[in-house]
Image (tube, rainbow, N blue to C red):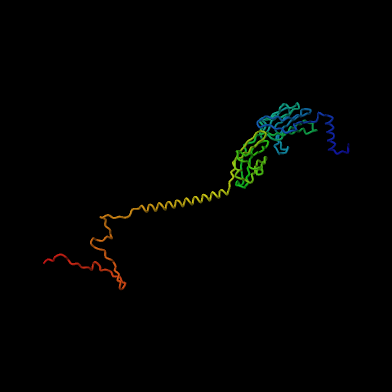
Amino acid sequence: MTWLPGRFLCRFLLGWVGLSAPGLAVEVKVPSEPLSAPVGKTVELACSYSTSVGDNFALEWSFVQPGRPVSTSQPILYFTNGQLYPTGSKAQRASLLQNPPTGGVATLKLTDVRPSDTGTYLCHVNNPPDFYTNGLGLINLTVLVPPSRPSCSQSGQTSVGGSAALRCSSSTGAPKPVYNWIRLGASPTPSPGSMVQDEVSGQLILTNLSLASSGTYRCVATNQMGSASCELTLSVTDPSKGRVAGTVIGVLLGVLFLSVAVFCLIRFQKERRKRPKETFGGSDLREDAMAPGISEQPSERADSSNGLLERPPSASTLTTKSKLPMAV
């Protein structure tokens, strides 16, 4: 055996010692299936081990967030030198089912579990000189949370012949909820070919919209802890009807304006006809009236022989005889 490299020789000797002395090999047993617990409940993470417990026996529980490497684990509690030392953010809720854990049972008890407790838990038993195995067990825990009330939204061209996308999403829920869209009311359901639903993303695609596509749609988010829902109303419009309606409204406004104009004109004519004619009383004097006994003389007289106009003699050139008797 001297030809074997030193590293392989050491592993061979340790394996032979472990087989010849079964009590020196630390063996940790944990559930092979992932565990789950409803939010707010108490969960027990079972961990058992077999070794020869001595003065150097130590136990450590730690936690790794989902998607993180084991090297980033955070301690939960220690047991060493006969003392238990809870630590970290879970210290107030973490304890051992059996304390001290020297009887082969190292189960962790965690109360009031929260969504942040979802992750991987490490049960590590160390008992030098038992170095044949790493003495490590991993348990995956999922805290079950019912889906929160989802948020419904829509986008797209909601007119006849267009397409619309209805979306639905819950901010919380474990395991991740599935989504289902349903049409409410007695309205005819759109043909299956015009509806495409994705239960994972919560999206409903409606194509070739018609007026019959209008209505109220409900999205239901469901997981093993419960369900929640939201609703939205889809209104499909017809652009052609909008144009016809606009034309009709324009014609009606034109007719109304013309009717008002004709009415105003007729009313003005009636008021003008009802206005009284100008009259004069016997005591009224007119500036252009002639004195009594004096006939109106033509202002101009036409001379037919030469076509000239002859003006009549002025009143200042006329002489009158006095009818008064002359005194002697």
Question: At which x and y percent is residue 147?
Answer: 64, 36
Please identify the residue farthest to the front as the structure is shown. 304
Splitting the image into 4 quarters, where does residue 286 fall? bottom left
- Looking at the image, residue 119 lies above or below residue 278: above
Quick check: 236 left or right of 5?
Answer: left
Q: Height in image: 231 above or below 50? A: below
**Against 182, is 94 above or below?**
above
Residue toward you, 70 or 202: 202
Residue 194 or residue 95, whichever sits in front: 194
Q: Is residue 231 left or right of residue 86?
A: left
Horizontal and vertical percent position of residue 95: 69, 29
| Count of number-bearing discs | 0
For the point 26% across and 68% down, the residue is: 312
Outermost residue, left direction? Answer: 328
Choose top left, top right, bottom left or bottom right for residue 39.
top right
Q: Quadrant of the C terminus?
A: bottom left
> Residue at left 48%, top 51%?
255
Q: Position of residue 69 (x, y in %)?
A: 72, 38
The residue at the point 19 percent across, 67 percent down is 320
User: In the orientation shown, which residue stands out farthest toward the bottom?
Assistant: 306
